[in-house]
Image (spheres, rainbow, N blue to C red):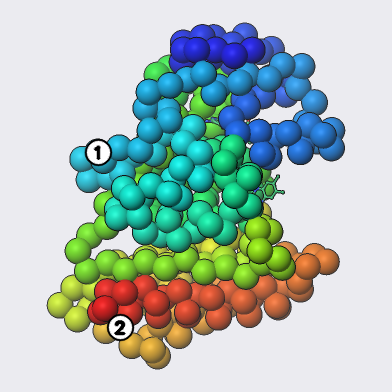
């Protein structure tokens, strides 16, 4: 099915008696491998690439940058608007797979898919992005911190779609940094850290540190936030925040790395990301 209007797409979603029978297809870069491996076996694919307008555009809204769910990851990576207004997203995008995959993969698809090792959900969490969801009852907005519910699971109901991601504009005095370690260039993150730091009058007034690859979904560290807010930025404070954030994690162990190794990576990446974010404010 290839709807050309949102109404048509929503009717198709509403008509599915079993949610597993119908799957939304955006860039296909996660869904097609899942079909190939028979991890998903829907009767019908709902190809939403025919939805135009805001679904495929990047706009500056009031206090935020609005990225349509169907914006290709590569288009966002090359966008001067993203580079200027959302440098954390711009820095994270080249870590997502390879150019060929980013040419098809969409920003919304990555966030809706919610892979725990994916870069963009962690960026959305670190920036406190607001996710615009459309369904039979109309539109609703969900904070990234409420959206990710666990392994490949989000707040989206079976009859809803993610239509847009609103990334808040950065306050003056804000620095950001995204860092990751993966086994090979283009692989999913073993661990990634996304840091956002705002300093005013010599004190940290806002701080958000998010990780990928350390749990069943992206993780926002409340420990780092409480260590940082109100403190004067210094190497010791940033290290203490990275340490407290990493200690609070219970990362999974698998063939790619033990839990201890991932925790170690989380601490090192967090400290470096926070330090670079701070240097970018100063610089
Ligand atoms: C070899 C390879 C390496 C990769 N490496 C990485 C990596 O390092 N990091 C990374 O983050 N990703 C990686 N990916 C995944 C890639 O980034 C995908 O593009 C992304 O995860 C999904 O985006 P998509 O547009 O292709 O979505 P699709 O594959 O079309 O859809 C993915 C899921 O999201 C749902 N969905 C999609 N859009 C919407 C929407 N608007 N509303 C509701 N539901 C929706 C679909 O129904 C499906 O369940 C890799 C993929 C491949 C094939």
Q: Quadrant of ligand 1?
A: top right
Res 132 quadrant in image: top left
Of labels 1 and 2, the one closer to you: 1
Res 240 label: none
Q: Is mark 1 within 8 Å of ligand 1?
A: no
State left or right for residue 266 relative to residue 204.
right
Q: Which image quarter holds the N terminus?
A: top right
Q: Residue extending furthest left?
A: 201
Indicate which disc, 1 or 2, sits on the residue closer to the N terminus: 1
Task: Tell me the residue at 39%/77% (across/down).
Answer: 276
Residue nearer the viewer, 69 or 50: 50
User: Of all residues shown, which one is farthest toward the bottom?
Assistant: 236
Q: Can the viewer see residue 86 in this picture? A: no
Instruction: List the residue tagged with mark 1.
Output: 61
Quarter the C terminus occupies: bottom left
* Residue 90, x across and y down, in percent: 42, 56
């Amino acid at each position: 099915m290839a709807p050309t209007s949102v109404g048509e797409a929503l009717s198709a979603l509403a008509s599915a008696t079993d949610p597993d029978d119908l799957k939304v297809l955006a860039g296909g870069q996660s869904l097609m491998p899942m079909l190939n491996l028979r991890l998903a076996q829907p009767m019908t694919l709902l190809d939403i690439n025919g939805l135009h307008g805001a679904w495929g555009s990047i706009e500056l809204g009031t206090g935020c940058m609005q990225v349509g769910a169907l914006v290709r990851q590569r288009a966002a990576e090359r966008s001067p608007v993203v580079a200027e207004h959302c440098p954390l997203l711009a820095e994270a995008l080249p870590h997502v797979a390879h150019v060929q995959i980013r040419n098809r993969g969409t920003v919304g698809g990555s966030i809706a898919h919610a892979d725990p090792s994916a870069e963009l959900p962690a960026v959305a969490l670190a920036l406190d992005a607001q996710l615009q969801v459309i369904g039979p009852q109309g539109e609703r907005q969900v904070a990234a911190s409420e959206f990710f519910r666990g392994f490949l699971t989000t707040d989206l109901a079976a009859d809803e779609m993610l239509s847009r991601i609103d990334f808040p504009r950065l306050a003056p005095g804000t620095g950001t940094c995204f860092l990751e370690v993966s086994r090979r260039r283009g692989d999913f993150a073993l661990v990634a850290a996304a840091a956002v730091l705002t300093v005013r009058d010599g004190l940290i007034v806002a701080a958000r540190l998010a990780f990928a690859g350390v749990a069943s979904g992206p993780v926002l560290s409340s420990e780092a936030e409480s260590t940082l807010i109100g403190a004067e930025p210094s190497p010791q404070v940033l290290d203490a925040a990275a340490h407290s954030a990493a200690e609070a994690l219970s990362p999974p162990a698998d063939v790619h790395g033990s839990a201890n190794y991932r925790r170690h990576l989380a601490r090192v990446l967090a400290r470096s990301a926070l330090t670079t974010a701070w240097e970018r404010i100063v610089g």
